[in-house]
Amino acid sequence: MALIVETVTARTLAGLRAARDGVTDADLVELRLDGVADVDVAGALAGRSRPVIVTCRPEWEGGRFDGSEEARLKLLADALALGAEYVDVEWRADRRVLAPQGAARLVLSHHDFAGVPADLADRVRAMRAERPAVVKVAVTATRLTDTLALRACAAPDVEIDQVLIAMGAPGQATRCWPAGWASRWTYGGSAAPGQMTTAALARDYRVRETTAATAVYGIAGRPLGHSASPAMHNAAFADAGIDAVYVPLESADADDVMAFAEGIGLRGASITVPLKTAIAARTTADRRGPCEPGAVNTIRRGSSGWDGANSDVDGFLAPIDRRGWPLAGRHVVVLGAGGAARAAIAALAGRGATVSVSARRPEASARLAGEFGVAAAAWPPPAGWDVLVNATTAGMWPDVDEAPVPRSAVSGPRVYDLVYNPPETRLLDWARAAGAETVGGLEMLVAQACRQFEWWTGRSAPVGVMARAARAFVTDPARGGAAAAGRRNES
């Protein structure tokens, strides 16, 4: 079972103790003494209710301690003498003052903030040869496939634990599925690039329950910080009792995604911007699955490669059908020319709507309109539409004060915004103020995700569970929904 460590930092000892005692979801607490002005090891350890890792990271390895090495190592030696469960010391440091008496409680660590060193495997072997309690290596991933080099270093040892982490957004899978890298624990908090909250690690990703044999799914695209899909699908897997985890796979490169998928044995994935059309070219359309309008939003491992499908069409239509909006013969303007726009156009044209495509780049809207046999409209679109569909990312977290078109262009009876984080966008505010009926993107998100889950697992999706998880994510600032809390409401 992988454990969860919450890293706490503060400028004062009192602040550090308060942060330590406020930890609720972690198994251990990492006490970062670097940055504490009135540092006192005994005071930092006194009264603790959880095991701790004492760390005092120097500036030369990404920390805040700017004093002498002698003073820094004395703090770590004191922590060992005072009974700290673990002490973290850098591989590049002169550790003689801590060994051999502290080896059984030593976390020997090495951080590379520049990337993945070519001799990574040699470094890990050299660290392991010193026989510490834990070997911890953190590298910086700029691509998903960078994490595979780290994974190749995994060597489970009955005597020496290891923690292998890739910092940065492309490395998040190493944090939320630590068992995949044979890591003894993972870190939560905000002290390093790519860290997640301990609450997300414990509740969404269930890191204490997953193993190296757990089936892995994910969401591929960039950016992914706004995405509620991990919360939603992980809640569905937990509810269904399926041993699976769904992780973020941040990349804008389809080759990178597919190579990583092969490297870790990915079972399936949701595909989002900007990869929907690029990934489609690398898959075989599964005609038994959801309709695919020239782009995929879902892949799964098939018998001879990757099957691709698109649940966006069904997901897009579900809220419209729920409200009984008429489409046949109605004029619908779709904003945008990406994968989401393709799904919307396919759905609308299939229902007999008169569709116009409007994009900031006229050549993009003309190309997409020609492909589907619909009209291309100016940007912003002129008045006279019955339904306006925003299939752009304008207004999506973190750019929550944006709108895809000027307020003066929002003048029709029905508006559908595919943005779901925040759930209430600037465009929807303007539309309601103008008396229009509205649909937010959260409903489509849940509907298309349910179809993905069913296509992957062959089981009925727990719709209510997934809807609650998605809503909780986009409205809780601590779990990624800061957009909902921070957006100005100007109607």
Image (cartoon, rainbow, N blue to C red):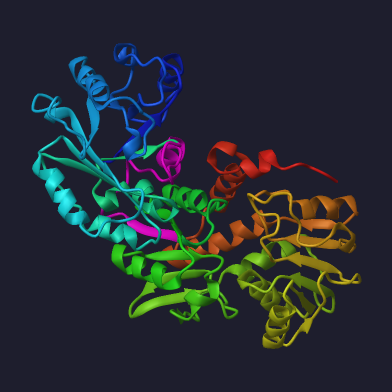
**Is residue 157 at least partly visible in the picture?**
no
Instruction: Please report the residue visible at 52 percent of the width from the left and 55 percent of the height from the top.
Output: 224
Q: Is residue 479 above or below residue 98?
A: below
**Is residue 4 at least partly visible in the picture?**
yes
The residue range painted magenta reads 190-218
| Residue 306 falls in image quadrant | bottom left
Along the line of sight, which residue is nearer the eye, 81 or 210?
Answer: 81
> Horizontal and vertical percent for residue 56?
31, 28
> Horizontal and vertical percent for residue 130?
10, 39
Instruction: Please report the residue visible at 29 percent of the width from the left and 12 percent of the height from the top.
Output: 42
Asked if residue 213 is among those painted magenta in the image, a careful observer would answer: yes
Instruction: Please report the residue visible at 55 percent of the width from the left and 60 percent of the height from the top.
Output: 449
| Residue 2 falls in image quadrant | top left
> Horizontal and vertical percent for residue 193?
43, 45
Instruction: Please report the residue visible at 43 percent of the width from the left and 76 percent of the height from the top.
Output: 307
> Horizontal and vertical percent for residue 108?
20, 37
